[in-house]
Image (cartoon, grey):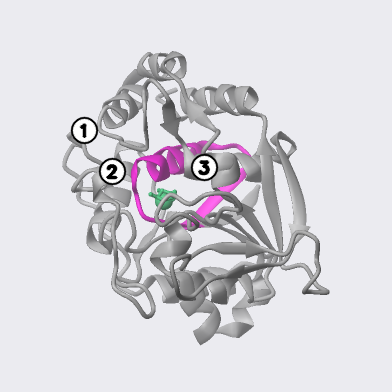
Amino acid sequence: KTPLIIDTDPGIDDAVALAIALNHANLDVRLITTVSGNVDVTQTTENSLKLLSFMKKEVPVAKGCNQPLLIKLEDASEIHGETGMAGFEFPKHHTKALPFHAVEAMRKTLESNEEPVVILAIAALTNIALLFSLYPEMKVKVSKIVMMGGTLSRGNTNSSAEFNTYVDPHAAQIVFQSGVPIVMVGLDVTSTAVLASKEVELIKGLGRVGQMFHALFQHYRGGSLKTGLKMHDVCAVAYLVQPELFQTQATHVEVALEGPAVGCTVADLKMKYHTDTNCEVCLAIDVPAFQEWLVENLEMSGDK
Ligand code: BDR
Ligand code: CA
């Protein structure tokens, strides 16, 4: 099993990614850390806790950064609803986040693991940039970062930037230049990997977990039932366990830190300006296979 830390901002697509990762036979989720992004970190922490309790999973949750490193937070509550996971009334829970910061929790988890850990980064990269800045010795303990973030084509915030790299571009730049191996699962693949009404109906039939997601999907503005619901963060989980669904290219990526394209991930695809690559970028995904994989895995995440 691959030991995993998930850094997240649930978020409806985050919630699907978490449900699948928590139940996958080849993944061992050791820690969930939260950050401000889709909504603020108090809410993303609460969303993680209530989802875990609904899924009957006991994984420690640590609350992370409230604001990006240098700029003000611009959230995405218009996409995910005011609470970040609108549309379903979760039962009351009594679980709490760890009594220390996400960065400390990541350090402890990395230190206590003999083998290197994978970080699944499905939100702004603030916590991870801070971890590498405060504790650079932790970098060798991370075997790779599989990141939903960035785009080589058009953006979903300004014309050129994807949301997670746009929210905290300085953090994204620190992480890309950290020397830790990175897989960038960006909009180039995640915008095509949608759920159509056929899959949404199948999910509705998958017991209480399926019904919960079906209710959330009715409030998710990351697409529509006609054009398809965008499952951005779920693609990063798919990459972890089924990398053969993706076509990738090794390259060097930098993040624009100012101007009208702030947050844009600029790839040196022809390696004209760099001699070393810092990232494997996903260029294409097998969409029908992904859709099938998602429904199958959600089915396995339900009550056995
Ligand atoms: C990313 O932004 C968030 O709204 C989603 O959860 C995903 O992580 C897509 O651009
Ligand atoms: Ca997310």
Can you identify the residue that label 2 sits on?
Answer: 80
72 vs 153, nearest the viewer: 153
Which secondary structure, mark 1?
A: loop
Q: Is mark 2 within 8 Å of ligand 1?
A: yes
Q: Residue at x 51, y 38 (%)?
A: 191
Q: Which of disc 2 and disc 1 is earlier in sequence?
A: 2
Q: Please identify the quadrant where the C terminus is shown.
A: top left
- Who comes first in sequence, dot 2 or dot 3? 3
> Label 1 CB, ligand 1: below 8 Å?
no
Question: Type of residue at label 3?
Answer: Ala
Q: Position of residue 97 (x, y in %)?
A: 29, 62
Residue 28 falls within the magenta-colored stretch: yes
Work out whether residue 177 or residue 212 is closer to the camera in this orientation and state it: 177
The CA distance from mark 1 to mark 2 is 12 Å
Residue at (74%, 47%) from the top-left corner? 248
Q: Amino acid at mark 1?
A: Phe
292 sits left or right of 156 in the view: right
In the picture, the disc for residue 88 is 1
User: In front: 245, or 51?
Assistant: 245
Left or right of 113 in this view: 212 = left
- Dots 1, 3 in contact, CB < 8 A: no
User: Which residues make up the magenta segment?
Assistant: 6-31
Residue placed under numbered mark 3 in the picture: 21
> Which residue type carries mark 2?
His
Q: Nearer the N terminus, badge 1 or badge 3?
A: 3
Q: CA distance from mark 2 to mark 3?
A: 20 Å
| Location of residue 241 with respect to 100 vertically, above or below | above
Q: Is residue 196 among the parts visible in the rendering?
A: yes
